Image (cartoon, helix red, strand yellow):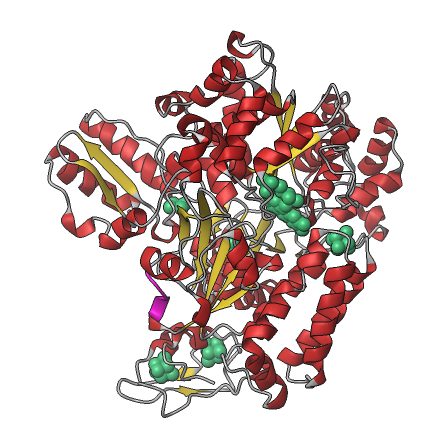
Amino acid sequence: MSESVELKTEEQEPEIDISIADAVIDKYINISGNLMPVLQGIQDEYGYIPRVVADHIAERLNVYPSQIYGVLTFYAQFHLKPRGRFIIRVCVGTACHVQGAPRIVETFFDKLGIGHAETTPDLRYTFEKVACLGACGMAPLAMVNDSTYGSMTVQKVDDIVADYNQRPLK
Amino acid sequence: MGAKEVEAAFVKLLDEKGVNAVVGKRCDVIKTGCRGLCANDVLVDIITPDQGRVTYDFVKPEEVEKIIDEHIVNKTIIEKRKAKPYYNQFVDAQMRVVMTGCGQIDPDSIEAYMEEDGFKAIEKCIKSMKPEDVIEEVKKSGLRGRGGGGFPTGMKWSFCKASPGDHKYLICNADEGDPGAFMDRSLLEGDPFCIIEGMMIAAYAIGCDFGYVYVRAEYPLAVQRLQHAIDICYEQGYLGKNIKGWNFDFDMRIKMGAGAFVCGEETALMASIEGHRGMSRPRPPFPAVRGLWGKPTNINNVETFGNVRHIINKGGDWYASLGTDTTKGTKIFAVTGKVKHTGLVEVPAGMKIREVIYDVCGGIANNRKFKAVQAGGPSGGCIPSDILDTPVDYDSLIKAGAMMGSGGLVVMDETTCMVDVSRFFLNFTRMESCGKCVPCRIGLKVMLDILERITEGRGEMSDIETLQDLGVAIKKASLCGLGQTAPNPILSTINYFREEYEAHIADKRCPSNCCKELLLWQVVEDKCVKCGACKKACPVDAIVWEKGQLAWLDKEKCTKCKSCYDACRFMAIE
Ligand SMILES: Cc1cc2nc3c(=O)[nH]c(=O)nc-3n(C[C@H](O)[C@H](O)[C@H](O)COP(=O)(O)O)c2cc1C
Ligand code: SF4
Ligand code: SF4
Ligand code: SF4
Ligand code: FES
Ligand code: FES
């Protein structure tokens, strides 16, 4: 389910402070199998994995960049582009599917003008479909960052978008 | 939902009123131990010396003051707000072994766990049993792996024990990728110490000195709770070197997954821990021989570990007395979909599916007709109404064309289209295929294309045969469990619901009014009972309805969201 790698956008990347990445790498440098925790830690810091940082990790951990990109593109969790301030995730697991998740997804697409794993140009929203958030009893389920919204309806989508449109971007 | 707020309200108001009470953390999807009845959140228990335990459901923060004033201060139970009899029925019809702690104790407190005989089982093992005895006891209990395959746990341990090597690993599989199952999450969030103790016992029996818990990335709370529990165990000497002076070493670490279903498969999981792409590899060699970093490794599911301490405490014979001939003990099911009370249900293996759905979970919601229950998720199949008396154990479910899998039971009613469900699962497995082998990578895509054609009304009769042939071929030729089981949902629905496929193909009609391309977007006049539920559901006011009048759907305004279809209890919109 990973997004496609778009390396062309590199020119637009803002200045990246590599020392933050170094701090994360230092923490894990002596542990075996440290590539995943390093990438996870770095994504926590930057919100995504900037290309220069990926190359830097390759150098410091002494692995081929191809191995790093192999891992980055394999797992849905890693992102190669900056993400929105509000991450909207709609569950499309089995329980949510039979309770009407598809229409919730489509309404979000419609309201936000973006598709799965895309970010609005103003970096306000990123939208993602996810498989089972583990709260199937409240299907269909949506999450915005850490807040959970259960028993979703099309009307509630409107309310949520209206609410988050009001919130500050920083 | 909102349990954090309810808890905060209790703490604040109790403080203001100077009442002496302890606020235990309880029920919340986001914050704690699940009691199983998730749809009726927030549940609150009030325990007083006079009245014992009283449970309230659907508690909102505004109501907290009233509950404190009347119940705790004036000692009168608010009968109106008490959880209705279904709650007791829901609880009484179950048998809780693994889930005893969940939702009853504070998952952040080792003291609470100690009160529930915490770490008694590992102490018993080390002080009075040889590792071989522990394995023997687990063998005697008949425990089988709860991760899906159902491999006998005692036997698996003995293989790894017998494997030569000075360094052995233990892995707890908490990847729980089956969309529709969440028992592992609840166990980790509700009773993390119990899983840690289970792993310690396994480590002692097999001779492992290091354990990993591989947790799904989507479960941040489980990670947080478990990490907290691990930290406390280290502080108090239950993990680390020479635990409690018992001359037993065990270290433990959490590994976070990164969002890939196939990583639940054991060889892919180990590749992922090592920091590679999570791709499966052929077995043998089995993990017990060559596992993580080439060392002998034993891997079990969360719920499997959850059973272990109870087996040691109460004995293998006691455990073996529960369940059926081939499946011992209890199993937790996540019952979701169109039932009245969705949630986690722990019952003795061998209970009939009918009892689980009707007696425990209250039957089908909205008075609709039952159609089927999907067991085993993307590797399982459907069980139609005429074989609802199938007992829930590994072998009976496989005979019925489904699978125990992780224990997800998704209940479907007459508005669920079986072709659409097949397409849903196939879409899931195709996206999650690691791509290593051709039958799975390409074959599933071809099957999906055919199913999409059918749901859009462009199917041909020969498609059904093609699907079956492809399905059988993919099952035979795929490398790992993902590909070997992915065709199951399709084969099983064709087997039991062939007429639905035929209706889509021959009549270009979806009998469940579900597949969008085949809908007419109109109200059937002689089915409509003029109730108006559809009008309320429509977000764009496309339904015209007055009291006592038939509803009418305005196709110009309609955005085809299908909300009205689900709202109408009479299947009156086509
Ligand atoms: C595609 C695939 C996904 C799996 N997902 C899980 C999972 O999420 N959790 C799990 O415990 N086992 C999962 N398994 C089964 C594991 O490979 C393994 O058999 C299991 O963890 C062994 O534990 P047990 O003996 O306690 O059942 C999966 C297998 C396959 C083929
Ligand atoms: S069956 Fe599918 S998931 Fe398994 S190894 Fe082959 S391609 Fe990968
Ligand atoms: S499908 Fe949606 S928009 Fe159309 S009438 Fe029904 S509820 Fe309204
Ligand atoms: S919900 Fe169904 S029965 Fe009720 S008015 Fe609408 S179409 Fe008629
Ligand atoms: S299927 Fe949506 S939360 Fe599980
Ligand atoms: S989360 Fe509250 S009962 Fe399950």
Instruction: Tell me, yes or no, if residue B172 can be seen here.
Output: no
Q: Nearer the viewer, residue B326 or B209?
A: B326
Q: Nearer the viewer, residue B506 or B56?
A: B506
- Farthest residue in the top direction? B245
Magenta region, residue range: B362-366
Magenta region, mostly helix, strand or loop?
A: loop
Residue A161 falls left or right of residue B291 = left
Q: Position of residue B499 (x, y in %)?
A: 56, 82
Instruction: Tell me, yes or no, if residue B464 can be seen here.
Output: yes
Residue B545 falls left or right of residue B17 = right
Q: Position of residue B440 (x, y in %)?
A: 76, 60
- Residue B27 picture quarter: top left
- Residue A78 picture quarter: top right
Q: Position of residue B356 (x, y in %)?
A: 38, 57
Q: Where B194 falls versus A5 (above or below)?
A: above
Q: Is residue B222 magenta?
A: no
**Residue drawn at 36 percent across, 59 percent down:** B355
**Residue drawn at 77 percent across, 33 percent down:** B290
- Residue B62 picture quarter: top left
Q: Nearer the viewer, residue B212 or B71?
A: B212
Q: Where B58 falls versus B119 (above or below)?
A: below
